Amino acid sequence: MGGIGESAYAKLYAGWRADPEAFWAQAAEAIDWIEAPKSIFDRNAGVYGRWFVDGVCNTCHNAVDRHVATRGDQAAIIYDSPMTGAVERVTYRALRDEVATLAAVLRDRGVEKGDRVIIYMPMVPQAVFAMLACARIGAIHSVVFGGFAAKELAKRIDDARPKAILAASCGLEPGRVIAYKPLLDGAIALSDHKPDFRLILQREQGPCAIDPAHDLDWRSEIEAAKAAGREADCVPVAATDPLYVLYTSGTTGQPKGVVRDNGGHMVALKWTMKNHFDVDPGETFWAGSDVGWVVGHSYIVYAPLLHGCASILYEGKPVGTPDAGAYWRVIAQHGVAALFTAPTAFRAIRKEDPEAKLLRKYDLSRLRTLFLAGERADPDTVKWAEAVLGVPVIDHWWQTETGWPIVGNPVGVGLLPVKHGSPSVPMPGYDVQVLDEGGAAAGPNVMGSVVVKLPLPPGCLPTLWQADERFRESYLSAFPGYYATSDAGFIDEDGYLYIMGRTDDIINVAGHRLSTGGMEEVLAAHPAVAECAVIGVKDALKGEVPCGFVVLKSGVSDAPAAIEKELVGLVREKIGPVAAFKLALTVPRLPKTRSGKILRGAMKKIADRDEWSMPATIDDPAILGEIEQALKGKGVI
Ligand code: COA
Ligand code: AMP
């Protein structure tokens, strides 16, 4: 491995390779166990083996209670909301009290170990209390991002079958209040499963009507529980019991329920805080994401708290709340040591303030490192961030499924040379390889499918929620013995990985993972649409945006422009605003192979203005010209 051969990282990685169980047994010592695991990895358990099968633990204890004695008055959560003007510091002691009380409310209302609880909330401290309260009593939370519409929420309700739903009355987006209650009511009307109750947090920016038959008022329940001195203790759970299920886009409209367990998750996340992110207990860590995404689960909530850090919970945007200096203000005001966000946030800041003039107003001296993930970190943005911040900018690559970095630059172990365009090298735990279509190893610098040799390390998904077979089909069947990441890329002669894009129909819009297949399902359901194809088109701000091509049924008399508008509205209504679906184009025909497969790749190349050549298998070459015309007509190219 060229330049990294003698590095501390190389030694660490070689040590893991030589004895993975010893590596993880040692990492597990950083966790408070109720019963320490004797078995580190059981290859006969679960779909591909399970970690720490006989360990007994509680994640809430490790994230909250264990810190009260040593750092009770230190901030655990710093809630900073330019949307409301609030800045609140929640200490570890206060966090314990809030979480223990909420956990008692849930338990007193019948939520038990193993029950699912859906959390549909914006970036407010109560969302974090809710996650930890579930962890405390062994209930399995499933957080649904606020930008999803009722139908998406309904799909998750039917799959998770929650006993309770915890929601806020509204979320706040710049210039508008998102009323959550109608979305929640709509979702429950659509779903077959009905939760026993809903606990609703009223926000003064947009209160909602409470339905006494189904809804409980969050604050009154908490006040009553506090008055009665009700608190719930941390319950022992098996290390392999699920902590949460987080739904993520699959290749169809049916999301995948990624399962995260308790023991392995704690061990892995705790390990990353020092070794990858180089942050010490007591320091302030900021993941500029949302609790609805995996980055929010891992690096707003669990990892920083497991490590005894103060974690920033930011309800705002990189720009417009109030300006492109918002991130600098938060870093300076709270003394952030490490920031983790998506490249799109930096593209947005750069677009508004190309010379970073606003940065000069703030003291960023405590910021040591910027971490970027969630989508490809384009070298241009990385270089700009390096220049304006004067700190290392570290790209790292992972997925909802893994819960923590697969490939990164382990700053705490020892910073490796940064290569722009590459998230660097595999973390211990991951044997990352690139395979060709036949499953043979691709040589250095040769593109192929990026896979991880089984078993996956602690913290990664052991399976999909109640869907072992779908898990096998989705991830394990393409390359037996390996987990298929569905990313394509190559490894260079120094062992650095380059991720070049997905091999399935997932696209990445502003760091948000979306399924074009799911959008096609919505478009195809419109009565005027005969067939359709959705592709991701390059976008200077969001990385990619979706673009839908539709062929109308013969005899449709409505104007194409009117139908296109309806289709845009339909995706927003069925999937949600987060899909950022604003481009629908009617075309006479779709380009296909002679066997009838839609040539999405060729359409994408044209839309991205990449070089393209006529696919040899195309049925009618003239159709790609029609696609080009349609894109020109809309000003896309
Ligand atoms: N609830 C309701 N609606 C939401 C929402 C939420 N929680 N989050 C986003 N939306 C809406 C937005 O308001 C927008 O609506 P619009 O079509 O009416 O404008 C739409 O969903 C698309 O959102 P987004 O793609 O985020 O675009 P944006 O223009 O609002 O913001 C950025 C662009 C770059 C500023 C924003 O994406 C951002 O801050 N990204 C930072 C990193 C990040 O969050 N990464 C995610 C995981 S690491
Ligand atoms: P998510 O599950 O939402 O985290 O999305 C995971 C997908 O985002 C990966 O499979 C990649 O396609 C993409 N991705 C995440 N991080 C990176 C990165 N650092 N570089 C390139 N692509 C990334």
Image: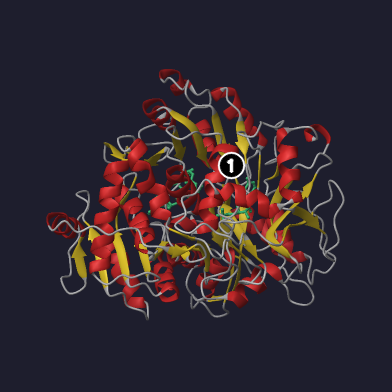
- Queried on whether the Cβ of the residue with tag 1 lies below 8 angstroms from ligand 1, the answer reads no
Three-letter amino acid code of the residue under disc 1:
Ala
- Total labels: the figure holds 1
Q: Is residue 512 visible?
A: yes
Please identify the quadrant where the N terminus is shown. Answer: top right
Residue 69 sits in which quadrant? top left
Which image quarter: residue 256? bottom right
Q: Is residue 189 left or right of residue 145?
A: left
State left or right for residue 128 relative to residue 437.
left
Residue found 39% across the figure and 72% down from its top = 157
Q: Which of these two is toward me, 28 or 114? A: 28
Q: Quadrant of residue 104?
A: bottom left
Q: What residue sits right under mark 1 in the picture? A: 540
SS of the residue under disc 1: loop
The chosen color scheme is secondary structure
User: Which of the pair 606/164 is nearer the observer?
Assistant: 164
Residue 169 visible (yes or no): no
From the top left corner, tell me how far across and down residue 342 is, in percent.
Answer: 54, 42
Q: Is residue 250 left or right of residue 203?
A: right
Give the camera-side residue of 312 and 508.
312
Q: Position of residue 72 (x, y in %)?
A: 31, 38
Query: What residue sits 83% from the left and 46% below the top?
Result: 445
* Other residues around mark 1 within 10 Å, as few (<14) / some (14–19) / many (≥20): few
Q: Position of residue 96 (x, y in %)?
A: 30, 48
Q: In the image, residue 204 lies at what x, y percent?
A: 19, 49
